[in-house]
Image: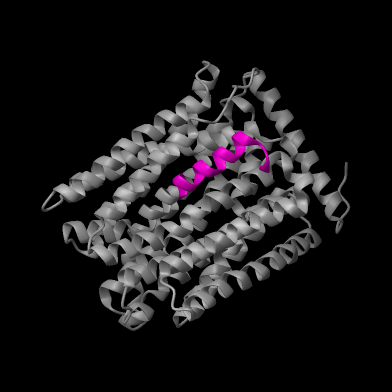
Amino acid sequence: MKAVPGDPSSAEQGTESAETTEFTETTESTETGGRRRWRSWHTLWVLLLLGWTVSAADRAVTGPVVTWMIENGVGFLADAENPHALGGLVGGLFFAGYMLTQFPGGYLGDRYGHRTLIVVSLLWAGVATVLTGFIGGLVAFIVVRVVTGLGEGAFYSNDRTLITATTPERDRSLAMGVVITGLSIGITVAIVFTPELVEFGELFLEHVEAWRMVFWVLGVATVVVGVVVGWWFRAHLTFSGLTRATLHLGVYAAVSLGLVMAVYWLGTSAGLSELWVALLEVALAVGLVLFALARKGTEIGPVIKNRDLFLLYVCNIAILWNLWFFSFWSVSIVAGAADSTFMNAALTAGFNAGAGILGFPAGGWLSDHGLRRGWGRKGMMLTFTGVQAVLTLAFAWYLSAAAHPSLWVMGLLLFTASLFFNALQPVGHALTAELAPARLRGSAFGMENLIGEMGAVLSPAISGVLRDKTGGWAAAVWMDAAIVVVGFCILTQVRYRPPADV
């Protein structure tokens, strides 16, 4: 079927037709033994990996920059009474925006084409990140970071759905693991290179303004990747389709921005703490889920009312809590525990993020290999989650028990826990794809991340409050470990039957 330019429904049908054809070619090539040759879907994996890398760096850089601001007493954190709590709230508000476009992004991808939404998301995030470097003042900084999150929120569900549509079942989890390796690469870049980019900024800016260079460099990199991805997808894109998708996403984003900032303004005007403001933002997300169910209950009911999918969504709260607790605060955790320099703390914290470069593809490969041997994805996900829980508990105990924690021991514990943590994620993504109806996978992944991002909203803020209250990071790490254990218990209740044709 040929898509008619400017017609959203035709564009969607054309995209779906192309994706189905590509999957058929993939399956035939696999069956004829051409599996090891470089194919077009491998190029797609690389492009999506680059997209994950730049978008993850854009969102993760706030934590190291906030830590640098606190240590140097500059910016809007210079005179804050509770700087870690305020910095955590800033990070949480980014994820409030990121959270609120998860489901709309997936829904619009099902309508306009998943490639279209991926390109829109990358260009949006790149421009907003560049603008962040020009912003001064707390409220303006929060607004532009929320706007950045609103654009990035459309990437995840469309990326996962496009991989599912273009990759055969036997390699689906591997593909998801390889592609999302970009998340770890991006977080590692943000953590490790922030000190270098700040020093680079000092060549052109005053010391107190040097942090701006970090956002300018990463934002330009994201725009470049967005242009490259758009060029590669050009056969599937139309100018009118991109425009309609951007405007439609813009409507959702404008409403979401108004809601996020209204909650922030009401909470701060009432004198509520950063913790309560973060909780109100999560309540906003719950309201959005209920609203979506009320408005489109018949259409999207199969991905909301499915018991096992919903349990996976809830498990994702623990996953994203852990991910953004360490991604946002790991530099500060290491620096505070070992009393090290900002650079040494960043390099040590990089072990946590860098473990995903091995963990994501390894977990994806093991998941597909185990499925062919009849192990099932749920059992593997439970195993990885259990090991991660034990290692996170060990890290919490070490911070509490050691008088002078070693950078090497902390780096080793962070690396090994993160290795299993990252390995479990592509397994979970493939599990979601198998449980969700094919026509609603974008909506399913969007709802999964919408609910899961509640953990990302709360984690930086609550952890920052605990740090200010206790004077150390041990309590926050213990809380993270407990949440991982709860996620493990919920995962045991998911009912799963491996597909027969693998």
The N terminus appears in which quarter of the rendering?
top right
Which residue sits at x=31%, y=56%? 330
Q: Report x, y in % for residue 46.
A: 55, 44
Camera sees residue 115: yes
Which residue sits at x=50%, y=57%? 54
The colour scheme applied to this rendered structure is one colour
140 in magenta? no
Q: Report x, y in % for residue 102.
A: 62, 54
Q: Which residues are magenta?
A: 304-320
283 left or right of 272? right
306 in magenta? yes
Residue in the foreground of this view, choosing between 463 and 355: 463
Decide: is 499 above or below 250: above
Q: Report x, y in % for residue 409.
A: 19, 44
Q: How many numbered circles are shown?
A: 0
Residue 397 lies in quadrant: top left
Q: Report x, y in % for residue 108.
A: 73, 54
Decide: is 362 above or below 286: above
The C terminus appears in which quarter of the rendering?
top right
Decide: is 146 above or below 379: below
403 left or right of 411? left
Which residue sits at x=50%, y=66%? 93
Q: Residue furthest left?
A: 403
Q: Main secondary structure of the magenta part?
A: helix
Which residue sits at x=76%, y=35%? 20
Camera sees residue 226: no
453 left or right of 39? left
